[in-house]
């Protein structure tokens, strides 16, 4: 199977998806770096599609029950960069 | 070496007997720390006051005749991606600058409960992505054995703090070798436990299906003790394994060891190979049978590891939006996406961005099957190969790192840098426990021998590491 080399347009699109702004010079550099890494990754292409993917961990069994417990808003809100009382201040969505 | 004596168990007995003042001991070591850490830069945050206070409380407990814990008075450093209540947790990233979690990770809770004294938070590669501890936002950690060299990574601060005598024990995390690599480069013991043996609650995630909290110590038995304290089921981590009975580990005499051919393959430094082969002969002298074995599916390990790790990283790191915690650069911005991108672009380092972009790529429509699913199949192949190998052998052996520690600032392409992880990632992909054991020096630089055992057979690792330490230290 041939996989397309990553293009500048793809790098830009990835930046949009990942919420990272990429400058024009970085686009070129990343295109080269990402391409050589992806080329190395292609070794996994040799693994047969018949190989079953098994569970990586044992079944955790019963999940713990939901329990209501008191919490202190100050502790929870402690790391919020911008707040208004006990509300998180965020940029506008619309 | 620490003034507290050669082994943690002995030191704890002396503390419990009131033979020494913990407060004086901790205060005097903390006083020397800035001088010792000036060139190494192992710590991002030293919790001097809290440490002295904890030591004073412990002294009072001893005076009252109360029983002390298994780590009473022992200084421990914590990697900066593990949450400690009231201390910063930056993951060596600008995006978490100023963030202070208000709770303890389970592992922190457990070492505190046993009387350990937390001395501070240690440097790392940004978000644990690296093997040099030079990619963080707050400067590199240097190797205490040779300041021109890296300490290894990503838990390089923890390893350097132990090797440099600034703390007795340390905790790190190991996603693809991040405990074993710096342990090897700094000539100390480092353990990556079985996946699920230690709770990850309170650990800031990078790649959940691969990472475990690991331990650093100068002696194999100290490593065992620290593992005993931090391991065990935790209902707050759904991947934490249920308690299980211990299996009697095999005796040194007749121990079956597989020396893995691929671990000595292309790209290995000749001097490293010699040292590890010497170490392997030492195990034979101790009664083990060592055979050379090939595991061909190891050829997929590095690529499979990076695909899975980057995929998980791209998803995990999407939480950093500059809104809920950490840095926020676009105050009062009118646009959600612009504010998001501004903070992430300016606050993430180059390696983190590279991994997020690649992770996004391998998960995207049209590429998911070709990369991510193939990597998962390769992972399953390797798991089956390992489980077959462990039916026949008690341990798998190889060099922890294929090369000697590189110089700080040595230029490498990202791919060259990733290749150094080739021997450590298989344990994370398969979930088995693995230890790096100091195996002497080559050209004046430390070499580590890696041993892997089957799932939950940590005790086999401690026994063999301990027996080897006894005849070589």
Image: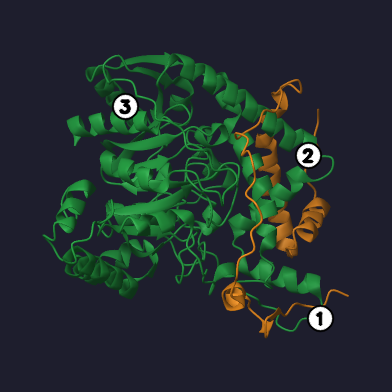
Pointer 2 residue: B368
**Residue A67 place in picture, x, y as percent:** 64, 59
The quadrant where residue B53 appears: bottom left
Q: Which numbered marker is on residue B57?
A: none
Q: Looking at the image, is mark 3 or mark 1 nearer the viewer?
A: 1
Sort mark 2 into few (<14), some (14-19) or many (20+) by Cα contacts within 10 Å: some
Question: Helix, strand, or loop for circle 3?
Answer: helix
The quadrant where residue A72 appears: bottom right
N-terminal label among 3 and 1: 3
Q: CA distance from mark 3 to mark 2?
A: 41 Å
Tell me the chain of label 2: B
Which shade of the palette goes to chain B?
Answer: green
**Residue B405 place in picture, x, y as percent:** 38, 45
Could you tell me which residue is drawn at 63 percent across and 38 percent down?
A: A61
Question: Helix, strand, or loop for circle 1?
Answer: loop
Pointer 3 residue: B274
Is residue B161 something one can see in this rendering? yes
* Residue lying at the far right of the rendered structure: A94
Which shade of the palette goes to chain A?
Answer: orange
Q: Are marks 1 and 2 on the same chain?
A: yes
Pointer 1 residue: B334
Q: CA distance from mark 3 to mark 1?
A: 62 Å
Q: Nearer the viewer, residue B148 or B432?
A: B432
**Residue B85 place in picture, x, y as percent:** 46, 68
In the image, residue A87 sits, relative to residue A45, either above or below, namely below
């Amino acid at each position: 199977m041939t996989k397309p080399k990553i293009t500048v347009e793809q790098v830009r699109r990835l930046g949009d998806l990942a919420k990272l702004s990429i400058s024009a010079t970085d686009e070129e550099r990343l295109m080269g770096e990402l391409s050589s890494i992806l080329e190395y990754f292609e070794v996994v292409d040799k693994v047969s599609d018949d190989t079953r993917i098994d569970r990586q961990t044992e079944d955790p069994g019963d999940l713990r029950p939901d329990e209501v417990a008191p919490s202190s808003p100050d502790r929870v809100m402690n790391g919020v960069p911008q707040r208004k009382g006990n509300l998180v201040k965020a940029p506008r969505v619309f | 070496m620490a003034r507290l004596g050669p082994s943690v168990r002995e030191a704890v007995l002396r503390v419990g007997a009131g033979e020494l003042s913990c407060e004086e001991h901790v205060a005097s070591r903390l006083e020397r720390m800035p001088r010792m850490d000036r060139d190494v830069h192992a710590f991002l945050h030293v919790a001097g006051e809290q440490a002295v206070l904890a030591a004073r409380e412990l002294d009072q407990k001893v005076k009252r005749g109360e029983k002390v814990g298994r780590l009473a008075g022992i200084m421990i450093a914590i990697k900066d991606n593990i949450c400690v209540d009231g201390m910063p947790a930056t993951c060596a990233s600008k995006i978490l600058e100023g963030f202070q979690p208000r709770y303890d990770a389970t592992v922190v809770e457990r070492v505190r409960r046993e009387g350990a004294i937390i001395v501070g938070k240690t440097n790392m590669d940004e978000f644990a992505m690296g093997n040099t501890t030079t990619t963080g936002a707050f400067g590199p950690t240097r190797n205490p054995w040779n300041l021109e060299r890296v300490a290894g990574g990503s838990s390089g601060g923890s390893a350097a703090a132990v090797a440099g005598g600034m703390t007795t024990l340390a905790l790190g995390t190991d996603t693809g070798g991040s405990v074993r690599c710096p342990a090897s480069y700094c000539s100390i013991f480092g353990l990556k436990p079985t996946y699920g043996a230690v709770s990850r609650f309170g650990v800031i995630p990078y790649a959940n299906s691969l990472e475990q909290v690991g331990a650093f110590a100068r002696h194999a038995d100290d490593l065992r003790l620290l593992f005993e304290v931090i391991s065990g089921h935790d209902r707050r981590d759904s991947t934490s394994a249920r308690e299980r009975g211990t299996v009697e580990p095999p005796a040194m005499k007749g121990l079956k060891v597989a020396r893995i051919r691929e671990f000595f393959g292309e790209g290995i430094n000749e001097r490293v190979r010699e040292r590890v082969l010497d170490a392997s002969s030492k195990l034979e002298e101790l009664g083990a049978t060592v055979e050379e074995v090939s595991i061909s599916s190891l050829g997929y390990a590095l690529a499979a590891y990076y695909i899975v790790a980057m995929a998980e990283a791209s998803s995990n790191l999407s939480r950093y939006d500059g809104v809920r915690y950490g840095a926020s650069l676009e105050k009062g911005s009118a646009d959600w996406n612009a504010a998001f991108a501004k903070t992430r672009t300016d606050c993430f380092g180059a390696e983190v961005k590279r991994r997020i972009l690649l992770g996004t790529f391998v998960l995207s429509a049209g590429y998911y099957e070709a990369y991510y699913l193939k990597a998962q199949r390769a992972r399953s192949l390797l798991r089956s190969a390992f489980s077959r190998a462990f039916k026949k052998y008690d341990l798998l052996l190889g060099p922890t790192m294929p090369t000697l520690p590189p110089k700080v600032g040595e230029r490498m392409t990202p791919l060259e840098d990733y290749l150094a992880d080739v021997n450590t990632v298989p344990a994370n992909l398969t979930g088995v426990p693995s230890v790096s054991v100091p195996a002497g020096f080559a050209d004046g630089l430390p070499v580590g021998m890696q041993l892997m055992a089957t799932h939950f057979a940590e005790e086999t690792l401690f026994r063999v590491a301990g027996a080897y330490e006894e005849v070589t230290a």
